[in-house]
Amino acid sequence: NLHQFTTAGLLREVVVDSSKSYFDTNVTPHHHFFHEDEGRLQDIESPELAVQGIPGVPEGTAISSIDVIVRLSKLS
């Protein structure tokens, strides 16, 4: 069901690693903090965040989106 909601544009799947995905109800373009110690995803509220130095894409393709996940761990 979650994948059907994603296909319908009601959820956004955020893949943290090959074995873990989260489904986000905020489907607007945005990035995330991932709290590794808690397994928790948090929206980054920063419209100023910019990704620079993106390499050219292969011919016949276009970038559809860029997802940034900033991984956080607690200090000891």
Image (cartoon, rainbow, N blue to C red):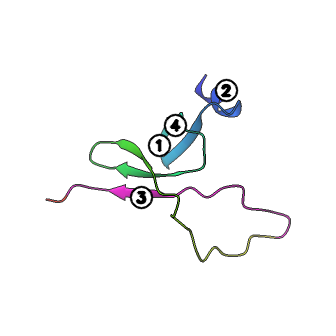
Q: Is residue 46 left or right of residue 66?
A: left
Give the mark, 2 or 3, whose residue is nearer the N terminus. Answer: 2
Q: Is residue 56 left or right of residue 14?
A: right
Tell me the amino acid under the disc marked 2: Gln
Q: Residue furthest top?
A: 1
Q: Residues within 10 Å of mark 3 (few under 14, many from 20)?
A: some
Tell me the amino acid under the disc marked 1: Ser
Residue behind mark 3: 70
Q: Label 1's element?
A: loop
Residue behind mark 2: 4
Residue shown at the point (84%, 70%) measured from the top left: 59
Give the mark, 3 or 1, whose residue is nearer the N terminus. Answer: 1
Between the C-alphas of marks 3 and 4, the distance is 16 Å
Q: Which mark is residue 24?
A: 4
Residue 41, by quadrant, is top left
The magenta stretch spans residue 72: yes
Residue 51, horizontal then vertical, whole percent? 56, 69
Residue shown at the point (58%, 74%) measured from the top left: 52
- The label nearer to you, 1 versus 2, is 2
Which region is colored magenta? Answer: 59-74
Q: Residue furthest right?
A: 60
Residue behind mark 1: 19
Tell me the amino acid under the disc marked 3: Val
Between the C-alphas of marks 1 and 4, the distance is 17 Å
Q: Label 4's element?
A: strand
Tell me the amino acid under the disc marked 4: Asp
